[in-house]
Image (spheres, rainbow, N blue to C red):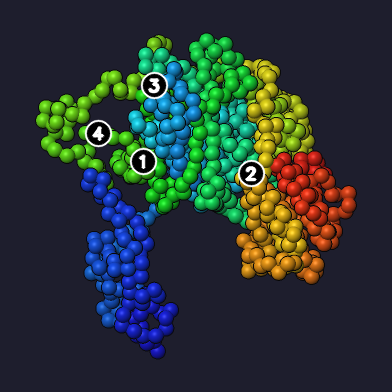
Amino acid sequence: MATARKNNSSRGTASKGPFNPLGPSNPTSSFETDTGHGGEVHQQSTDTDVHLTTQQGIPVADDQNSLKAGTRGPTLLEDFHFREKIFHFDHERIPERVVHARGYGAHGYFELTKSLADVTRADIFQRVGEKTEAFVRFSTVAGSKGSFDLARDVRGFAVKLYTKQGNWDLVGNNIPVFFIQDAIKFPDIIHAVKPEPDRGFPQAQSAHDTFWDFISLTPESMHMIMWVMSDRAIPRSFRFMEGFGVHTFRFLDTNGRSTFVKFHWKPKLGMQSVMWNEAVKINGADPDFHRRDLWDAITSGNFPEWELGVQLFDETFAEKFEFDVLDPTKLIPEEVLPVQVVGRLVLDRVVDNFFAETEQVAFCTQNIPPGIDFSNDPLLQGRNFSYLDTQLKRLGSPNFTHIPINAPRCPFAHFQQDGHMAMHNPKGRANYEPNSLGAEGGPRETPELGFRSFAEPITGTKERLRPDSFADHYSQARMFFRSQTAPEQKHIVDALVFELSKVEHPHIRERMVAHLLTLDAALGEKVGEGLGMELPDPAVPAKKPIDVKTSDALSIIARGPESFEGRKLGILATSGADAKIFNALVKAVEKAGAVYEIIAPKISGVTLSDGTAVTAKQKIDGGPSVLYDAVAILVGVDELGALLKDAPTQDFVRDAYAHCKFIAFTAETKPLFEKCGFTEEDFDDGCFELGSATNVKQFLEACAKLRVWDRELKVDLDA
Ligand code: HDD
């Protein structure tokens, strides 16, 4: 027979008062609400004398039990606290972004290091040393909001700069070109890559029929495909990737003179990617790998930084260049037109609230301040329509700029009013322009300061045509492939074979290999061989490809980082591990500007040979070696027996080796390598037996190279 229980059932005893594990007046969480009345902010205090209230401010007496007619009777409709709480919960979700749904943002600033006053009147580029507040959101494209971070995918690199003349959104990617030339094809490429409509899978993956069907029917995507199949699409961290504005934009000076510009973000710590097999395992071990990395770096004071670079050119350069500068499937190699560094972007503050900032931030390509203008790139022109439109769908009101993360930091004044959730309505009687009722009839337009478009003469027939100058789809794809180092080329081949092996329709595989044969015969042959198929005839190009000069800047490895700074060493340690070596290792890691994490049999940690106790960050099965850039294994003799029997420990060692990482170990650890099937011959330049502080130093110096690429050919079936 059930007994009446008025309190929370988990307490198990009947009592009249509301159940509150922390007592009746525990600190509530703190949050701010912008009332919008003159920007006044009410803060919900953490003071213990502030009670839980409804949204209307009514104090709540019982937050554990709904109001019922009789102890075991039905819930009453008049329970306004219950209704408000559930109503709000039911409406917590907003539509996720149709693309780039999974992302992570952080605050920071842009600092100008070189004035561009001679080419642009944009205020942000005038005064060296001046800082401009920034918010950046990184993202994957195809996956939904809850998908994993290490998908093979393009990464979004969207930067909102709160300039003194309004918000400038540079909504770029970590790849400088795009799949398609005309925005009208955007829904098609996105439908093709997203989960297939009948079955609703695969999630966050391009390795399926519809994606490759569309790609193999769209030769203009070949250049982008080279990038997406390369290591660029599986970055180690947001901190180690480049960003690009992609399109050609214009700078306009005070006289309205135009200079074309392409924007680049260059990571201060250099570029780095993971291996595909590693990416697959990271997704299981830590689906939040990238967002956690950004959070950890910023909260530990290792602020990620990028340089802003510009490629500036005029009409004469544009006319002479082999490709159309309005074609977003083409880039201008740095060797042809150098990138000038003009500033730096530093991310130094994590968000206070993920939803309020990262989820509600609304980037719009059309947000540009005076001094910057669009080019006629047809992809950019279409984007300028799409972004505004999507924010209305996602955020539900034309007043999305009233949300603090989207609001300009400079003064603003206009007569737009009303609408859902209007927070800033104009005061006074006159809500139109011009008027003679407000103070000086203002706000009024300012021809001098105001945004002006480039006065470009336009002629032509109204038509739906691609220009001939957009017709070469293979030359730059070839340039990209041939600019890669041998391991990077191998990764592209492996990625194509992997992806096309997931395609069920042979005709799609054939059509794709035909494109690859036209792009680069050796590439096509290797992929065809990897698929075990007879080679088709090469695809017939709309325009015969040309051989253009290769560019080292396109390779991650050719321009790899020179230090281990910002990277992470995983130290798998057990009790009894040599304290001297451990201490030397930790010192060397810190000196290199890197970080380390201890992985141990138990999370409580280990006791080193000198009796020092150190706590662990991970238990061995929670800290596989894929989470680290290099690893060290320090085992006490008494603990070795247990580790030899432990499958996750063996995975740790085998994966570190297979993923070409630098590995350090003490003499006592060698039986573990034997147990994993390694012989003396397998110990290469990337394996360091640690016996003294000197070789600890050598190990850390070697780690700067990040990977032992020669090893890959020994451990990979596809090699
Ligand atoms: Fe886009 C989001 C980057 C082409 C339509 N895009 C979005 C985001 C990034 C990019 C980084 C996420 C912004 C954020 O973090 O909130 N998109 C690009 C780049 C492109 C590109 C670099 C090619 C050079 N996009 C593109 C086209 C269209 C769109 C051609 C449509 C015609 N993109 C959108 C969108 C999104 C978006 C549907 C979804 C969420 C959002 O805008 O705010 O409007």
Of tags 3 and 2, the one toward the viewer is 2
Give the distance between the C-alpha atoms of the residues marked 3 and 2, in whole angstroms: 37 Å
Disc 2 designates what residue? 565
Q: Is residue 169 left or right of residue 340?
A: left
Residue at horizontal 82 percent and vertical 62 percent from the top: 668
Please name the amino acid that badge 2 sits on: Glu
Q: Nearer the viewer, mark 4 or mark 2?
A: 2
Labelled pair 4, 1 in contact (Cβ < 8 Å): no
Q: Which residue is mark 1?
A: 406
558 relative to 12, above or below = above
Number of numbered labels in the structure image: 4
Q: Are marks 1 and 2 in contact (CB under 8 Å)?
A: no
**What label does residue 413 carry, if any?**
4
Which one is earlier in the sequence, the residue at label 4 or at label 2?
Answer: 4
| Distance (Cα) linking label 4 and label 1 | 15 Å
Task: Name which residue lies at 59% across and 44% down.
Answer: 237
Left or right? Give the position of 217 relative to 459: right
Question: Does residue 143 appear in this view?
Answer: no
User: Quarter of the image containing the N terminus?
Assistant: bottom left
Asked if the residue under mark 4 is in contact with the one under mark 3, i.e. CB atoms within 8 Å, the reply is no
Q: Is 36 on the left-hand or right-hand side of 388?
A: left
Residue 47 in sight in this render: yes
Do the residues bearing badges 4 and 2 touch, measured as CB atoms within 8 Å? no
- Given residues 57 and 352, the one toward you in this image is 352
